[in-house]
Image: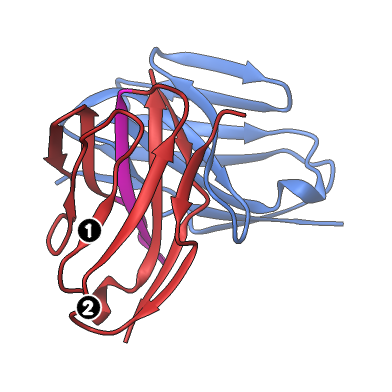
């Protein structure tokens, strides 16, 4: 079948580093995207990986391994405002994972 | 300001009463789509449109209709809403691989 798997919840403290993993099984794959959604808000785009490797954008980085059907989002120097849900999404099938709720504690 | 707008933001209706949720984007994007978001299920695509007059079903199209008569507008139509369509709906438009989402429409069908 077609699916994206990511952990449902992650908790970390301010200043720490957290990694949110995503494994996917899909028929149409062009790349893997990550979105952030705060409670009551709309999803906002964070990153996109079409090729294997690491993409860095400030405190956030995203990694893709096409051969392993796996990617992750890495958040560094966590801040309270990073508390949100994070979704991986396949570009092609336009499928989203169920989301990972990140809680950053002081 | 580049944006996707949706109306209404909140709607409570009754079973069987036809409704339309409007979506408009001012970025001249060709690709637009509708999603519903339910707890624990993430976002599921309802319909999408690659361009004017071109629409296609997503993963959960049953009970919904769409139209794309103009590039900027992509309304979602529920001809006969049922309680299982109670959800949070998002419209999105896309440039390349980045999707821009509207603010969402929270729909309750009684």
Q: Residue A100: horizontal and vertical position, in percent?
A: 52, 53
- CA neighbours of label 1 inside 10 A, class few (<14), some (14 to 19), many (20+): some
CA separation in Å, label 2 and label 1: 11 Å
Which residue is found at the position 19% from the left and 43% from the top? Answer: B67
Q: Are marks 2 and 1 on the same chain?
A: yes
Q: Earlier in the sequence, mark 2 or mark 1?
A: 2
In the rendered image, the vertical position of residue A103 relative to residue A35, given as above or below:
below
- CA neighbours of label 2 inside 10 A, class few (<14), some (14 to 19), many (20+): few
- Quadrant position of the N terminus of chain B in the picture: top right
- Position of B79 with respect to B4 (left or right) is left
The chain ID associated with circle 1 is B
Mark 2 = which residue? B17
Q: Nearer the viewer, residue A26 or A46?
A: A46
Q: Residue B39: horizontal and vertical position, in percent?
A: 42, 67
The kind of secondary structure the magenta stretch mainly shows is strand
The chain ID associated with circle 2 is B
- Quadrant position of the C terminus of chain B in the picture: bottom left
Which label is found at residue B77? 1
Q: Which hue is chain B drawn in?
A: red
Q: Is residue B20 magenta?
A: no
Quadrant of res A31: top left
Q: Which residues are magenta?
A: B30-44
The chain whose colour is blue is A
Residue furthest to the right: A106
Which residue is found at the position 39% from the left and 27% from the top? Answer: B94
Q: Residue B102: horizontal and vertical position, in percent?
A: 48, 45
Q: Nearer the viewer, residue B54 or A22?
A: B54
């Amino acid at each position: 079948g077609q699916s994206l798997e990511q952990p449902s919840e992650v908790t970390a403290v301010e200043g720490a580093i957290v990694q949110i993993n995503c494994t996917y099984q899909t028929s149409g794959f062009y790349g893997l995207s990550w979105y952030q959604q705060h409670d009551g808000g709309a999803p906002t785009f964070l990153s996109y990986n079409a090729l294997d490797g690491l993409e860095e954008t400030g405190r956030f980085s995203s990694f893709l391994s096409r051969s392993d059907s796996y990617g992750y989002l890495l958040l560094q120097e966590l801040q309270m405002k990073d508390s949100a849900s994070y979704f991986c999404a396949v570009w092609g099938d336009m499928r989203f994972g169920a989301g990972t709720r990140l809680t950053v504690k002081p | 300001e580049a944006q996707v707008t949706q109306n209404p933001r909140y709607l409570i209706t009754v079973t069987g009463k036809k409704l339309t949720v409007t979506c408009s984007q001012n970025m001249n994007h060709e690709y637009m789509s509708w999603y519903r978001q339910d707890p624990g299920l993430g976002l599921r695509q309802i319909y999408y449109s690659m361009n004017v007059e071109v629409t296609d079903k997503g993963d959960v199209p049953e009970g919904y209709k769409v139209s794309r008569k103009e590039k900027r507008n992509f309304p979602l139509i529920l001809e006969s809403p049922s309680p299982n369509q109670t959800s949070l709906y998002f419209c999105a438009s896309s440039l390349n691989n980045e999707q821009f989402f509207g603010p969402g429409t929270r729909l309750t069908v009684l």
